[in-house]
């Protein structure tokens, strides 16, 4: 069965995808691909913002990135568990329905336990959604994404490649700012949370500066002003390394699928 979405980012909480892979998502959407975000939880444990506010902020952020799909799986915030068969089945059902060619998920080393669990859950779901006998809600046909890529959260990864997001930095920033309930408007009122030693990344008054520094750091690795790092667990087959290095999005070659 063919893919329905070119790329789907799995995010433990609303705003994680914008912060960590918003540039790539905006870049793919601008190229005309169908792109989406599936938030695993509604972020109901957050110190600030109600689930309703956060849902509206997520919608605005998706609009800023040019996404066609933004859904929430409604798994428990603070309770993501890769060993929970029910959570796995829910994610498998969603992947079979959305049929993404490429799946983005958190890097396995992270600070927040939900981020670690989301990484493992994504890895298991991408595998099991291809198994015919694995039951999942919706009774959709089995489907296996072509690749799972990890995006960096709090712990650095060694990237397989860096995506040039220079032309999409503004869209990324607008999407992050859409999460207004999470962003400290007044530095003096920034609310500390368990996600960091001195407040969450998001509620930190210097959030956008920190993210800009990070994107510039990875951009410098590829001679771009801004970049985002990705790690592929599998070897990525390249049909034409010369075209790839010349830029312009040389296609990767995936044998034996579809
Ligand atoms: Zn998170």
Image (tube, rainbow, N blue to C red):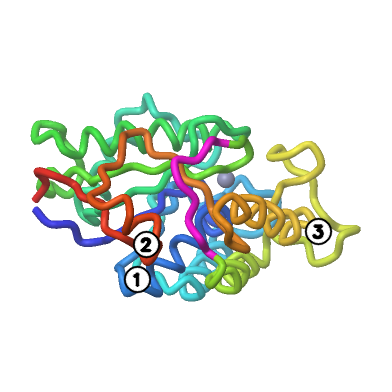
Q: Which residue is mark 3?
A: 205
Q: Is residue 54 above or below residue 195?
A: below
Magenta stretch bounds: 157-165
The alpha-carbon separation of the residues under discs 2 and 3 comes to: 28 Å
Q: Residue at x 72, y 46 (%)?
A: 200
Q: Which mark is residue 109?
A: none
Mark 1 or mark 3, which is nearer the start of the sequence? 1
Of 73 and 113, nearer the camera is 113
Image x and y of residue 156, in percent: 60, 36
CB of mark 2 within 8 Å of CB of mark 3? no
Tell which residue pokes out farthest to the top in this image. Answer: 83
Q: Residue at x 26, y 58 (%)?
A: 251
Mark 3 falls on what kind of element? loop
Q: Is residue 236 above or below residue 227?
A: above
Q: Which mark is residue 36?
A: 2
- Asked whether residue 99 is drawn in magenta, I would say no
Q: Is residue 146 left or right of residue 109?
A: left
Image x and y of residue 248, in percent: 37, 66
Q: Which residue is mark 1?
A: 68
Crowding around mark 1 (Cα neighbors within 10 Å: few <14, some 14 to 19, many 20+) is some
The alpha-carbon separation of the residues under discs 1 and 2 comes to: 6 Å
The alpha-carbon separation of the residues under discs 3 and 1 comes to: 30 Å
Mark 2 falls on what kind of element? strand
- Asked whether residue 163 is drawn in magenta, I would say yes
Mark count:
3
């Amino acid at each position: 069965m063919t893919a329905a979405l070119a790329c789907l980012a799995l995010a433990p909480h609303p705003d994680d995808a914008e912060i960590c892979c918003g540039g790539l998502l905006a870049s793919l959407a601008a190229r005309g691909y169908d792109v989406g975000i599936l938030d695993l939880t509604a972020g109901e444990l957050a110190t600030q913002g109600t689930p309703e506010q956060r849902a509206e902020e997520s919608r605005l952020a998706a609009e800023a990135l040019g996404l066609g799909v933004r859904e929430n799986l409604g798994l428990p915030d603070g309770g993501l568990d890769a060993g929970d068969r029910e959570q796995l089945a829910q994610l498998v059902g969603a992947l079979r329905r959305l049929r993404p060619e490429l799946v983005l998920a958190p890097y396995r080393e992270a600070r927040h336990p939900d981020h670690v669990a989301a990484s493992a859950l994504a890895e298991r779901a991408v595998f099991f959604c291809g198994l015919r006998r694995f039951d999942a809600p919706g009774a959709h046909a089995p489907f296996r994404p072509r690749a799972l890529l990890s995006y960096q959260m709090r712990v650095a990864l060694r990237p397989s490649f860096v995506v040039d997001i220079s032309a999409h930095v503004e869209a990324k920033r607008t999407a992050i700012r859409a999460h207004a309930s999470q962003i400290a408007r007044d530095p003096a009122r920034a609310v500390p949370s368990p996600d960091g030693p001195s407040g969450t990344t998001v509620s930190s008054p210097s959030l956008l500066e920190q993210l800009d520094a990070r994107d510039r750091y990875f951009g410098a690795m590829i001679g771009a002003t801004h970049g985002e790092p990705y790690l592929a667990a599998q070897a990525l087959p390249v049909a034409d390394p010369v075209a790839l290095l010349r830029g312009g999005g040389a296609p990767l070659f995936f044998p034996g699928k579809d």
